[in-house]
Image: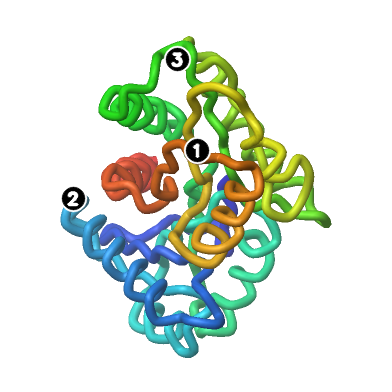
Amino acid sequence: MSSTRSPSPPGPATELLIISHGSPSEPAPQEAFVRELAARVAEVSGAEVRGATLAAEGALEAAVEGLSHPLVFPHFMADGWFVATNMQKRLAKAGLAEWTTLTPLGLLSDLSALALEHLRRAMQESGLPVGETTLIVAAHGSPSNRRPAEVTERFAAQLRAAPDFAAVRTGYVDEEPSIEDAASVEGPALVLPFFAAEAGHVLMDLPEGLEAAGFDGLVLPPIGTWEEIPRLIAAHLRERAAA
């Protein structure tokens, strides 16, 4: 996805603003996370990078101050309502006149390849048998918008094309099939949380669903927190800035 507030191109000095959802009930940890992510992306890209959540009061307004026409990277897993509508309104309300929205994390073309490499290492380190292990992709979903599930299913389909797994199943917090249903499997299995951050759904809903399923296998950290993500974002930034 690529949407733009203004048809004019970004200026010669690349400015990147990383925006994540954040946690309204406990904003500080997620605000610290996105700022640390921005610092790591700046380190590997050489660009000016700032980060803010939508949840922390005043964070977005502070982050856009002094920016002219930044590239905005949504640290979200889908291009649903928050990215397509809410974030755009919030940027304008924060005082930003022009910006270019980049492809969200969950839709980056190289994400599935990065995930496959990460999964192979995790399986090897954990002794999970290649070709005999079930992969469970746990995601948010939405009862009112098909887009989040569509993005998740596309990601899962890309992993199914690899011979590494006995099956790739998807389960959701907010729609069917549930995480409990997806994780009710026999034999070796592991869970990939298709989430941008380690917040409420990952800390509460996911463990509850896995416990209900009796799942006691390997659960990876959410994909948006992996150490490879800053370089993936930096590569996307270079591609877009050069376009």
Label 3: few (<14), some or many (≥20) within 10 Å?
many
Viewer-closest of 185 and 77: 185
Q: Where, by quadrant of the figure, is residue 200 drawn?
A: bottom right
Q: Do tag 3 and tag 2 residues touch (Cβ < 8 Å)? A: no
**Side of 104 where 130 appears, left or right:** left
Mark 3 vs mark 2, CA separation in Å: 31 Å
**Side of 195 where 130 appears, left or right:** left
Mark 2 vs mark 1, CA separation in Å: 29 Å
Amino acid under label 1? Answer: Val
Residue 40 lies, in percent from the top left, at 22, 58
Viewer-closest of 239 and 6: 239
- The circle on residue 164 is 3
Q: Return the residue at label 2.
A: 44
Q: Where, by quadrant of the figure, is residue 142 drawn?
A: bottom right
Q: Is mark 2 on a helix, strand or loop?
A: helix
Task: First in sequence, mark 3 or 2: give its number.
Answer: 2
**19 is higher (above) or lower (below) than 160:** below
- Image point (29%, 50%), residue name: 230
- The circle on residue 191 is 1
Query: Which tag is nearer the camera, tag 1 or tag 3?
Result: 1
Q: Do tag 1 and tag 3 residues touch (Cβ < 8 Å)? A: no
